[in-house]
Structures are given as structure tokens and as C-alpha cells.
Image (tube, grey):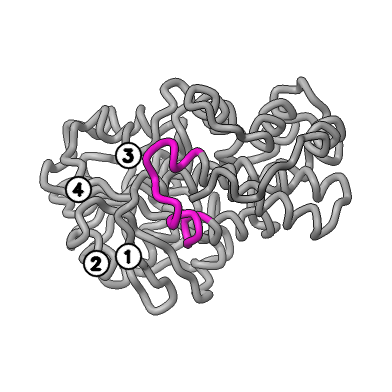
């Protein structure tokens, strides 16, 4: 198989290195120096330091070269750049290639999921557009630690074939047909991770985090079902699994943003110190807008939005959440 991976951040590089062990894989990087280092020295010191990459992995800064004769294209760029990258590569995307999005975010301007952005720009066969999502912290996967993820594809047979192709000795790929649910899970978990980080920054313990994860999962499920997803998806790897890892790990960029907010730092100062993108920062307003349009109650998400835009302090956001009137725990969950 000829595979093109678009995006040489930590997760894109990790996936490309894994895929290169079994397939002819070419990684596209915006920066020529990153592409050169990957090809010549088998390292990506900018985004994945301290890890040696598969020796057969090659990289290029030329998208036309990356996409030539590609059977599978992996989109691994931040959500805010997805549309511009897809517009850049559109003339070179083979019409018979399968596409897998690993981007966990919502487009701010449109509220589109990433597969919707792909369809809007490329007009690609929806049965060929898939999603890979799960508790996949890049450094742990790159280190070969046992991990699992889920590949969602409307075409079950295609999903099973691609899942087998991506599976390695250390990364097990399960399949699902719920593309919408997997994308919503991968996006909303970043918002809840910011909330969990705020709790950490304020000095709260595991009771608080467990409550945030559990009630955050309920918000995720409500929105996902309202958008056409399936309840059971949110109990799996792309829902509960990804949410747990992202809210708990110190490797999580979104949790770290929340922790710094909880400690009193401004969002501008926090993001200025970050080389990699925390998807939840840009996705939170888009997710809150989707929830409002669909009439879905998401109190944690709304308070995270308020903290990010500066209209509420972390302490006040917690106080208001604790004044929220609790009802039956599963009143709106099938």
C-alpha cells in the first residue's frame, strides 16, 4: 500500500512511523527542515523528540509528491488548518484513495466535523472517508506501549480492511460504523479535559475529576446523539476511553491548558508558550454553538467557554456548576 500522511505533528509522525513498518509511507510536512530531518536522520525533534522513527519512513514538503499514487491518505493536521490544507492538496488527491481523519476538532467557522470538511472541499465518496479516534497519546504509542483505537467507516468491509492494515503489534484497531459519534467523542473530550485541568490547577482531587469525566461523558453523549451518533459509541474507545486518558494524563495538552488556567495564568500567555495545538481551545466555542443550536444542555462545556473567553474566573465557573440543579442521572440517555 502507498500511504500519504498529511501533517508531521506528534500524532501524524507517530502514525506515519508505525505505518511505515508495513507499508510504503510518505509524510508531508510544511517545514522543509522537518521533512529533511525525518528522511535523513529518522527523527522529528520539533514535535516528537527523543524517539527514533522507522528507518523506511520518508518525508517531503511537497504535497504533490506525498499524494502521488496514494491508496490511503491520513489527515493529521489541526482542525483550524484542515480546510486550507485540503484546498491546497485537492488537485492531487486520487479519487479512488481512502481517507482517514485523525484530527479531533470542530471547524470554528462552520461547526463542521472533519469528515464534513473533507466532503465539502474534496467532494469525496463518503464511504471512503473514515475516522481514527481513541485514547492515543502520541508519545506512549511511539514508545510501543500497548494501545487501542477505533476506526469508524460507513462501509463496514472497508473499515475492517483498513483496520487490519493499520493494526500493529502494539496498536490494536477496532472498527465501528458510527463516524459521527467517533468524531463528536474525539472533539468534546478536549473540552472536558480543559475542565479537568482547571480542577487540577485549583487543587481539587479525584472526586472532582471523576465527576467531571462522568458528567462530561453525559454531555458528549447528548450532543453526539443529537447530531446522529449512537449512544454505545460513547462507552467505547472514542468516547469513554479517549476522555479518561485526556482528562488524566499530564501529556494531554488540553488538560495542561486547563491546569494553567486554574493556577491563574491567562490563556494568551499559556498558548504563547505552546508549540503544538490544544484542540479544545478553538473547538470549545464551536461545540457550545452546536449545542445551543440543537438545544442540548452542556453546562460544563458552557463554563469552559466562559473561562476561555475571560467572562468567568475558574473559581466562579466551579461555583456556578455546583449550583446547577441535578436531576435523574440518566434522564436523557437511552
Q: Give the residue pinned by disc 3.
A: 115
Provide the secondary structure element on which disc 2 rests: loop
- Residue 114 vs residue 223, the one in the foreground: 223
Circle 1: is it few (<14), some (14-19), or many (20+) Cα within 10 Å?
many
Residues marked 2 and 3 touching at CB (< 8 Å): no
Of labels 4 and 3, earlier in sequence is 3
Of labels 2 and 4, earlier in sequence is 2
- Measure the C-alpha gap from mark 2 to mark 4: 19 Å
- Measure the C-alpha gap from mark 3 to mark 1: 21 Å
**Could you say which disc has been placed on residue 278 in the image?**
none
Q: Give the residue pinned by disc 2.
A: 23
Residues marked 2 and 1 touching at CB (< 8 Å): yes
Q: Give the residue pinned by disc 1.
A: 19
The stretch in magenta equals 223-239
Residue drawn at x 46%, y 31% as measured from the top left: 80
Of labels 3 and 1, earlier in sequence is 1
Circle 3: is it few (<14), some (14-19), or many (20+) Cα within 10 Å?
many
Q: Give the residue pinned by disc 4.
A: 128
Provide the secondary structure element on which disc 1 rests: helix
Circle 2: is it few (<14), some (14-19), or many (20+) Cα within 10 Å?
some
Circle 4: is it few (<14), some (14-19), or many (20+) Cα within 10 Å?
some
- Between marks 4 and 1 in the image, the one whose residue lies nearer the viewer: 4
Q: Does the image show residue 118? A: yes
Q: Position of residue 241 (x, y in %)?
A: 54, 61
Amino acid at each position: 500500500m502507498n500511504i500519504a500522511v498529511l501533517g508531521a505533528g506528534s500524532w501524524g509522525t507517530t502514525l506515519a512511523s508505525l505505518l511505515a513498518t508495513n507499508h510504503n509511507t510518505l509524510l508531508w510536512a510544511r517545514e522543509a527542515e522537518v521533512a529533511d530531518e525525518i528522511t535523513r536522520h529518522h527523527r522529528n525533534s520539533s514535535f516528537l523528540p527523543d524517539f527514533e522513527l522507522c528507518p523506511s519512513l520518508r518525508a517531503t514538503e511537497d504535497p504533490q509528491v506525498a499524494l502521488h499514487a496514494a491508496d490511503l491518505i491520513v489527515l493529521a493536521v489541526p482542525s483550524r488548518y484542515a480546510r486550507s490544507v485540503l484546498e491546497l492538496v485537492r488537485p492531487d488527491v486520487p479519487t479512488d484513495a481512502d481517507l482517514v481523519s485523525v484530527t479531533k476538532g470542530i471547524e470554528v467557522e462552520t461547526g463542521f466535523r472533519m469528515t464534513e470538511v473533507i466532503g465539502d472541499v474534496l467532494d469525496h465518496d463518503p464511504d471512503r472517508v473514515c475516522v481514527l479516534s481513541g485514547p492515543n497519546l502520541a508519545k506512549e504509542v511511539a514508545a510501543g506501549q500497548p494501545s487501542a483505537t477505533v476506526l469508524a467507516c460507513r462501509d463496514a468491509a472497508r473499515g475492517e480492511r483498513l483496520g487490519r492494515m493499520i493494526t500493529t503489534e502494539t496498536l490494536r484497531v477496532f472498527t465501528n460504523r458510527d463516524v459521527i459519534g467517533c468524531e463528536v467523542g474525539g472533539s468534546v473530550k478536549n473540552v472536558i479535559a480543559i475542565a479537568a485541568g482547571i480542577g487540577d490547577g485549583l487543587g481539587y482531587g479525584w472526586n472532582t475529576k471523576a465527576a467531571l469525566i462522568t458528567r462530561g461523558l453525559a454531555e458528549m453523549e447528548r450532543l453526539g446523539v443529537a447530531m446522529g451518533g449512537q449512544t454505545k459509541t460513547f462507552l467505547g474507545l472514542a468516547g469513554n476511553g479517549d476522555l479518561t486518558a485526556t482528562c488524566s494524563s499530564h501529556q494531554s495538552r488540553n488538560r495542561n491548558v486547563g491546569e494553567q488556567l486554574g493556577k491563574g495564568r491567562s490563556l494568551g500567555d499559556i498558548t504563547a508558550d505552546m508549540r503544538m495545538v490544544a484542540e479544545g481551545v478553538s473547538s470549545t466555542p464551536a461545540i457550545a454553538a452546536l449545542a445551543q443550536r440543537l438545544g442540548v444542555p452542556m453546562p460544563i462545556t458552557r463554563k469552559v467557554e466562559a473561562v476561555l473567553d475571560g467572562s468567568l474566573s475558574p473559581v466562579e465557573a466551579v461555583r456556578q456548576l455546583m449550583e446547577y440543579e441535578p436531576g435523574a442521572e440518566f434522564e436523557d440517555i437511552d
